[in-house]
Amino acid sequence: MEDLINLKINGIDVSVPKGTTVLEAARQANIKIPTLCYLKDINAIGACRICVVEVKGARSLVASCVYPVSEGMEVYTNSAKVLQSRKTTLELILSNHERKCLSCVRSLNCELQALAREYGVDEDTFSGEKTKYDIEDTNPCIVRDNNKCILCRRCVAVCNHNQGVGVIGTNNRGFATDIGCAFNMDLKDAACIGCGQCVVNCPTGALSEKDDTAIVWNAINDPSKHVVVAPAPSVRVQIGECFDMPIGTNTEGKLVAALRRLGFDKVFDVDTAADITIMEEGTEFIDRLKNNKTLPLITSCSPGWIKYCEHYFPEFIPNLSSCKSPQGMYGALMKTYYAEKSGIDPKDIFVVSIMPCTAKKFERGREGYMTDGLADIDAALTVRELSRMIKKAGIDFVGLPDEEFDPIFGIATGAAHIFGVTGGVMEAALRTVVEVLEGKESEDIEYRDVRGFDGIKEASYNVAGTEVKLAVVSGTANAGKLLKMIKEGKADYHFIEVMACPGGCINGGGQPIHDAYTRDTVDIRGLRSEAIYSHDEKSVLRKSHLNPVVKEIYDSYLENPGSHKAHHILHTTYIARGK
Amino acid sequence: MTHAIDKTNFCNKQTRVALRNCGIIDPENIDEYIARDGYQALAKVLKTMTPEQVIKVILDSGLRGRGGAGFPTGRKWQLARQIVPDADQKYVCCNADEGDPGAFMDRSVLEGDPHALLEAMAIAGFAIGATQGYIYVRAEYPVAVKRLDIAIRQAREYGLLGENIFDSGFSFDIDIRLGAGAFVCGEETALMTSIEGHRGEPRPRPPFPAEKGLFGKPSVLNNVETYANIAQIILNGPEWFASMGTERSKGTKVFALGGKINNTGLVEIPMGTTLRTVIEDIGGGIPNGKRFKAAQTGGPSGGCIPAEHFDIPIDYDNLISIGSMMGSGGLIVMDEDNCMVDIAKFFLEFTVDESCGKCTPCRIGNRRLLEMLTKITEGKATLEDLDKMEKLCYYIKENSLCGLGQTAPNPVLSTLRYFRDEYISHIVDKTCPASVCKKLLKFTITDNCKGCTLCARKCPVNAISGAVKQKHVIDQDKCIKCGVCMDSCKFSAIEKK
């Protein structure tokens, strides 16, 4: 039996386990304490002072996000003193904040703006010198505008601890404190992996994705361009959130309808490419396993992970699957297979992808993501950018009818749908690889051991007499941990799936952003992943190799998985990068 | 010569405990320290006492932390010994990051008697159950660093640090860590964060270092001067130490006496000595026959004590009760030529500059506070601003993360408490009564002017005009209030108001 601590919050009796913070105890009693720098599982440093509360007997107000409960404690979360203090804190923050709220990408989805409204702040209480910064937008994925930074350090915490990257930190001190790379190095020159976790964890508009909507609008409006678009697996269960639909709603049909109404010439599905990825990667795995080639094989779908490996663990580059990501395969096939079949000059095809990810913007520009001199992808938009386009075009997303993807790049299996969540690629690969190796259809196709949100998951299956050892990792800090263990000989696997973002694409850096309170009280990742698994369960086809489109593309064009032609179009190479 | 100095009030009114060896022994020679009973206390502790007994002696002595806050040292050690009974590692740390402007008490001990510090840290290590100590010393003290280094090496050679000291089974070693010049690293959690190799920033408390300190282990952090008392307490007994001082502040305290005073320097006096004794007897009074206005104690986090409290016995609690604090022992004397608003601004400029920038109240609040003060010194503020400023002071004290922010407004609040009329003069009358605040000053030429033209030639901005042998005039729009004319005038014809 755990030791329970009894305390009173605003006169209400609360019992919580020892070690609980006042903030957590208050949440348990349904008392909302505002936060800015605090973020569950990511940052608890007591810096912003918005969450201050009065504790009877304490010398001063205390930051509830880091203050542990104690027996008999009496806490007041909304006394006049507390409310006035929070208001002053907000007014001070605003006195050094660029208040361009009307044009800010985070307007109406900004934690500072929401609090300012709740507390009825006076914008002019404090005036004085403001810090001035240039907007840093040379990184292909991420834009930093420190004029809007409130120094909550959530980005620093997630980059350092959760992602194990640590390219940003605190520079200077006092009023001149700012966030950036060491010695003010440009983010594009740092060993940033572009995962965008800093962006989704930023409470204000200080961090945002590099906005590529303008080039997409231009392409749509250019009659000489044949513009095709396709969303990644996780996008369909998330874009609804941008239109206030419940978290975890699958809106695939509405998404297709919206893309069509935006004026794209064809609306395809990256999921089809995900099925092809399984064919290629599965073949690669079987080849490496049977012929004693380099193992473990590590997946290559996540561009943040790839860049992390190139920067921090280049010795594992031979382990990376040579497969392009589904985005890359989709783009490459558009400009080869689709161009040929539809009789359009590939130079006139403009390929857009809708991604849960900011790193896809970097991946798009990789040298190895070109086929016959043409970039596979011409623009990679995040879910947030697409939602802005839909809103700008006046499309009532919620009221849209369900529509279907265009043939033929529009059919996908359940195996492809689950790519969007950690463990999904592994499970999809197993569904195919096991059948190929065992030479018979398998009954049980749900590999539950690789599901769930543990940072490092391990499983082992007996496949055709071989004990195949697997690991599934999400969050690059966990990937680093696992690779270190492998290097030290403490772990050993045949096949590893890595996703850069904790939880996989459903928690990607390009996804809709929710405030800290929602994140603390709603299991966002859980709801999104349920939607994905339920999509899989409802799918008629749940194994990639059964996808008729995949069969058709191999039969009529690529010959077979791992063929010379498939390698030319669907595979890539990697380079070691410095730290 | 030495004899004559001993006869002066500056020396013979002092009681030297922490500074007992400073200037007397060769700090680079361990034998000289040993000749003055050095390492006897450590031997006594290791050979004849239990950790609990050591802690009890320190508790009974009434020694309180000399770094500023005055937390009872014995209690600190007791907590670090007891709070995590099964800790696999504990640490003893020394705060030698003396950063108050004009303060050099710790430097004097570090440079003059480094072994006293090492001995005390080893005793603390024995008391709490630690085997490793760290001295966090500011890199701006190169002599101190060098002498500490020598002292540590000598102590290791003699077996007074290292494995199995005095064959007692107790092992203890000490390493030096250099501070990079951030004032906030004198704050205990920031200091530990810095030793750990991170940016020196405070962490929220609780957990307190006694539970989770350096590298997350139970740790004790004391200031240099605190440690400098330990061996003497062990050797002479707690009663001896407690016989000095006041009821709740025992022993002596070293002050860095400076400012408008005839004898400046370090003075060690028993707690409870009055400000009058320090300033008039030891300090030899105020130069040039000027009148005492206030004494600033406690460094940038402290406050100003006005003449009305001249006879207050100096101890921790009395200083707090009159709106100042002991701090690490800075004592700056001010006379009638000092503007109290300017003084508050000076100290606040320091803390604003030294804020680490982590929490909002300190990072932005203190900055805005400084801007408000500047407005006052420029004659641009209203009484409403004064009210707002005072409220902001209390907000910052109440909401800041660490001691630096929580105490930064103290110079403002204490000058407001005793010298509010000076603030009012700046705001309402637009004058600086002490004629310090430049923006409110006006230089004019009186009838004493002989028309020698010297001032006009010296003026760097050509603001003075007038014919030879005629009275000159200052163009107020051009004047930058540098005071060169006044300094150069041979006829005292220039007036500053």
Image (cartoon, helix red, strand yellow):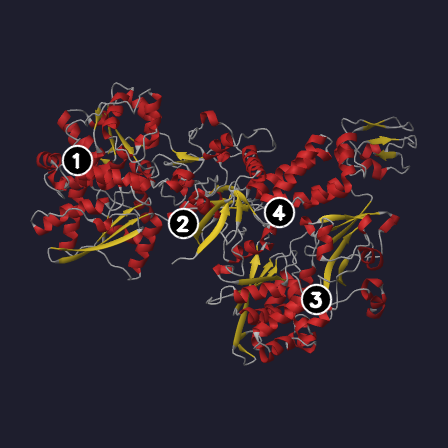
Position of residue A86 measured from the top left corner of the image (x, y, whole percent): 55, 38
Tell me the CA gap for discs 3 and 2.
45 Å
B260 or B32, nearer to the observer? B260
Q: Mark 4 or mark 3, which has the lower sequence index?
A: 3
Tell me: A378 left or right of B407.
left
Please report, as a chain letter, where disc 2 is located.
Answer: A
Provide residue A358's location: percent of width, then percent of height: 34, 37
Question: Mark 3 — residue?
Answer: B18
Q: Position of residue B79 (x, y in %)?
A: 56, 64
C-alpha distance separating marks 2 and 4? 29 Å
**Is label 1 in a helix, a strand or a loop?**
loop
Residue A412 is marked as 1
Please tell me the numbered disc located at residue B406.
Answer: 4
Badge 2 marks a residue whose secondary structure is helix
Mark closer to the observer (4, 1): 4
Q: Is residue A45 visible?
A: no
- Label 4 packing within 10 angstroms: few (<14), some (14-19), many (20+): many
Look at label 2 and name its amino acid: His
Q: Earlier along the polypeptide chain: callout 1 or callout 2?
A: 2
